[in-house]
Image: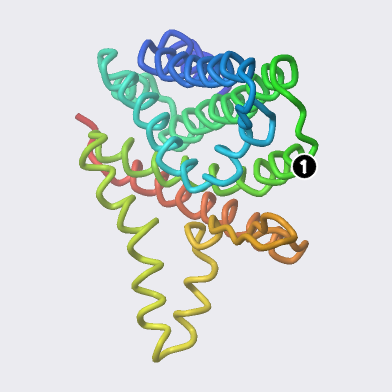
Amino acid sequence: MLNYMKSEWYRQRNNRGLQNTILVCLGLIILMVAVLAFFGRRPGFAYANTYFAFNGIFTSMSGIFPLTLVFAGFMENNSRNRQSPLKNSVAFGIPRSSIYLGKFLVQLLICTLVYLILPAVLVCLSWLFLEHSNEGEWYYLAHALIGGYPLCVFMLSIGFCFIFNIGNSISGILPILFIVYILPYLFRFLGMKYPLFSEAAEWCPASMLGLSFDNAGIHFYWDTPIRMLRCYLSGLGGALIFLCAGIFWLKKREIR
């Protein structure tokens, strides 16, 4: 499996769609900081500070789901366009479970690096060129990234499961949207009569991305240790479920 992971890493390293997506994200971060720093020279401009720069991340954690899905789509479409590497790998006798797990681990590594690098670039540029607000934004950013990571892993797992096995990003997105976004609402609706469904809705990763605001500041779902643990159990547990489901699906389906 290690050799297959090396070949998958090489394919993803030369993935133009993935590279362009990362460059666009980096470009937007650089542009935002540059604009804030430029207008910060003008008197009365109150937004050229680290709090405002970080605010777009820790108050928009729900954006990690569609962003992860975009990266998953680009990574898988790249593999589809290279003379059916899956079919060739199976023909060479590589177990399907090793293929699936190897591809997923490489994509998980890439997404983890992107998850760390993009905020790191924002932090470095903001620290160098913007006013330091010191209003808790460093804590909020770190806390948001720590709590959001298992949910990102969950989204990558379910995205990879459907996009890889269906073979089409558009068709694969539909069941993903249903499971991630619509199913929790159905559970809440049923929970009005059956409390068990209401409890199930609370364990859905999409239910853990909400924020609340008061005079004390910003409150994430995972502010308490118990809820942080629940967040990791839900995210990583859900990722494991769809990882196993994807392997089972790949073993059963016909490869063309």
Q: Is residue 171 above or below residue 75?
A: below
Which residue is at the front of the view, 30 or 157? Answer: 30
Which residue is at the front of the view, 239 or 99? Answer: 239
Q: Residue at x 64, y 15 (%)?
A: 41
Q: Residue at x 44, y 80 (%)?
A: 197
Q: Which residue is mark 1?
A: 135
Residue 130 x/y as whole percent: 70, 21
Which residue is at the front of the view, 165 or 173? Answer: 173
Image quarter hosting the N terminus = top right
Q: Is residue 33 above or below residue 13?
A: below
Q: Image check: 177 left or right of 126?
A: left
Which SS class for mark 1?
loop
Outermost residue on the bottom side: it is 193
Q: Is residue 218 above or below residue 143?
A: below
How crowded is the residue under tag 1: few (<14 C-alpha within 10 Å), some, or many (20+)?
A: few
Q: Amino acid at mark 1?
A: Glu
Q: Image check: 81 left or right of 136?
A: left
Residue 103 x/y as whole percent: 47, 28
Residue 163 x/y as whole percent: 31, 38
Residue 65 x/y as whole percent: 45, 44
